[in-house]
């Protein structure tokens, strides 16, 4: 970024005497510095509008109109900018007087004064250090831009997460029969959301491993009863959004199993398998065995409704949820591309 | 508070599954019909069942980027009216001419009930301009 920007920087030279101007131009050009020369006030203003990196001026060029034009340009600079200006003073003029005068009319500039005669080497090194200073200013500008972009992105994400929590809250409240049940369900869903957020953040912010999301969801249940939950499948990278949705679905399935399904009995087992077919479809299967006999609920609850809606939106095809007497079975097939991180 | 008039068929264009989930429930609570959902403009244009829809709730940022305004414009060209449902009110205001109204997030049921009624009085043949 900085390397490209250095090509953008060029030096504007103002010197009313042609010989001075040509001399400066040759010196800088020979050392690989791009130079443009302003002859007259109109051309000066036009070139200033194209934002030169550095300004080199002889003292005799600085009549009141020129001083004012440069002053206006400095005032209108963006916040990150502090234009370097090299001023070549006449031999006989006391530098302090000019410095005091120009500092007053030229705010936010980096002024370097040279009393003539000045050696070529001295002047060249002044121009080069000014170009370097300019480059650092552009780095600051890029940094500021990145920061405000991050702030916008953060604001968007925070709003999104607040909307998610608000939805979970409203939907949990709808079906709750007691305050205790509501509190437990809401806290569980919020914890599932928080856990998957941490997992995605720890991964690299934009993706998470499928198996990691599964482990995360099951760790509280596995701790209680050895290996009653088994899972098996290839390593798949999920987008942050897909990881969140799947984690919340697995959370609903697991809590359902704890309340009504396989995790209600010591001999109950859950198996979760996933695979990717040759035509790029992800195939998911959640299967419960060994729990109490299952029957289709008369009214579908939060979990079933959420899983149906969320998986349908994630994959573009609806899941199949079967309430077999021997145990619940939930399957989903859909394009892997829809759950993969977008940048890959 | 279900509406006493005939139910409206509402489609939802939104990339956050939790919000779709909630909006679906709210639409049904209000006595309307939830006609389906899509998470991106790309998904929306593939749908074959849009002709029976009374209106679409459209988020600004979708799974395929900031495509909500384009989606609302595309829908208006099919004679289907839209309402923005978004946390990006400033952007919604820029494109207010392609929608009937804007609902801020999080969505309140009272505001949703009131603004869904706008779909009832819309001339289905009037296309918007962008």
Image (spheres, grey):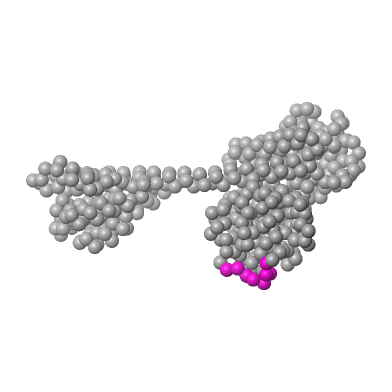
* Percent position of residue A321, x then y: 82, 47
**For the magenta stretch, what is the residue range?**
B122-129
Residue at figure coordinates x 24%, y 62% from the top left: A43
Q: How many numbered circles are shown?
A: 0
- Residue A262 lies within the magenta run: no
Q: Is residue A45 left or right of residue A21?
A: right
Residue at figure coordinates x 75%, y 66% from the top left: B52
Q: Say if residue A26 shows up in the picture.
A: no
Q: Quadrant of residue A162?
A: top right
* Percent position of residue A12, x then y: 25, 55
A65, above or below A102, in the image:
below
Q: Say if residue B21 shows up in the picture.
A: yes
Q: Is residue A100 left or right of residue B71?
A: left
Q: Residue furthest bottom?
A: B125
Residue nearer the viewer, B80 or B121 = B121
* Percent position of residue A99, x then y: 18, 43
Q: Residue furthest left?
A: A92
Residue at figure coordinates x 34%, y 53% from the top left: A7
Residue at figure coordinates x 66%, y 49% from the top left: B107
Q: Is residue A271 left or right of residue B126?
A: right
Secondary structure mostly seen in the magenta stretch = loop
Q: Quadrant of residue B7?
A: bottom right
* Percent position of residue B75, x then y: 65, 65
- Residue B127 lies within the magenta run: yes
């Amino acid at each position: 970024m900085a390397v490209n920007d250095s090509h953008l920087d060029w030096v504007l030279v103002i010197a009313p005497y042609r010989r001075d101007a040509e001399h400066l131009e040759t010196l800088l050009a020979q050392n690989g510095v791009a130079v443009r020369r302003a002859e007259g006030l109109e051309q000066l203003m036009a070139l200033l509008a194209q934002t030169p990196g550095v300004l080199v001026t002889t003292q005799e060029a600085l009549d009141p109109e020129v001083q004012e034009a440069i002053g206006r340009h400095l005032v209108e600079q963006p916040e990150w900018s502090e234009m370097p200006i090299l001023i070549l003073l006449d031999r006989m003029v006391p530098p302090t007087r000019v410095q005091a005068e120009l500092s007053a009319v030229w705010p936010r500039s980096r002024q370097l004064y040279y009393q003539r005669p000045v050696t070529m080497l001295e002047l060249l090194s002044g121009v080069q250090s000014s170009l370097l200073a300019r480059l650092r200013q552009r780095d600051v500008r890029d940094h500021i831009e990145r920061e405000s972009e991050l702030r916008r992105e953060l604001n968007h994400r925070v709003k999104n997460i607040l909307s998610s929590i608000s939805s979970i809250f409203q939907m949990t409240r709808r079906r709750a029969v007691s305050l205790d049940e509501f509190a437990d369900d809401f806290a569980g869903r919020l914890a599932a959301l928080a856990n998957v957020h941490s997992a995605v953040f720890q991964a690299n912010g934009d993706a998470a491993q499928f198996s990691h999301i599964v482990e995360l969801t099951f760790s509280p249940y596995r701790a209680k009863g050895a290996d009653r939950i088994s899972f098996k499948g290839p390593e798949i990278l999920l987008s942050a959004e897909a990881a969140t949705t799947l984690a919340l679905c697995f959370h609903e399935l697991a809590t359902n199993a704890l309340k009504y399904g396989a995790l209600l009995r010591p001999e109950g087992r859950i198996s979760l398998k996933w695979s990717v077919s040759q035509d790029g479809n992800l195939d998911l299967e959640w299967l419960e065995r060994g729990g109490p006999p299952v029957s289709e609920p008369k009214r579908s609850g939060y979990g079933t409704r959420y899983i149906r809606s969320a998986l349908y939106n994630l994959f573009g095809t609806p899941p199949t949820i079967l309430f077999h007497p021997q145990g619940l079975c939930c399957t989903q097939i859909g394009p892997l591309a829809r759950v993969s991180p977008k940048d890959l | 508070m279900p509406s006493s008039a005939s139910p409206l068929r509402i489609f939802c264009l939104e990339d956050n599954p939790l919000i779709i989930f909630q909006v679906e429930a709210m639409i049904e609570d209000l006595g309307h019909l939830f006609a389906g959902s899509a998470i991106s403009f790309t998904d929306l244009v593939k749908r074959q069942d849009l002709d029976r829809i009374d209106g679409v709730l459209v988020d600004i940022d979708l799974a395929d980027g900031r495509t909500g305004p384009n989606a609302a414009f595309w829908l208006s060209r099919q004679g289907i009216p839209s309402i923005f449902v978004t946390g990006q009110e400033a952007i919604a205001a820029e494109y207010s001419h392609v929608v009937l109204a804007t609902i801020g997030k999080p969505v309140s049921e009272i505001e949703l009930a009131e603004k869904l009624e706008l779909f009832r009085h819309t001339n289905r043949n009037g296309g918007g301009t962008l």
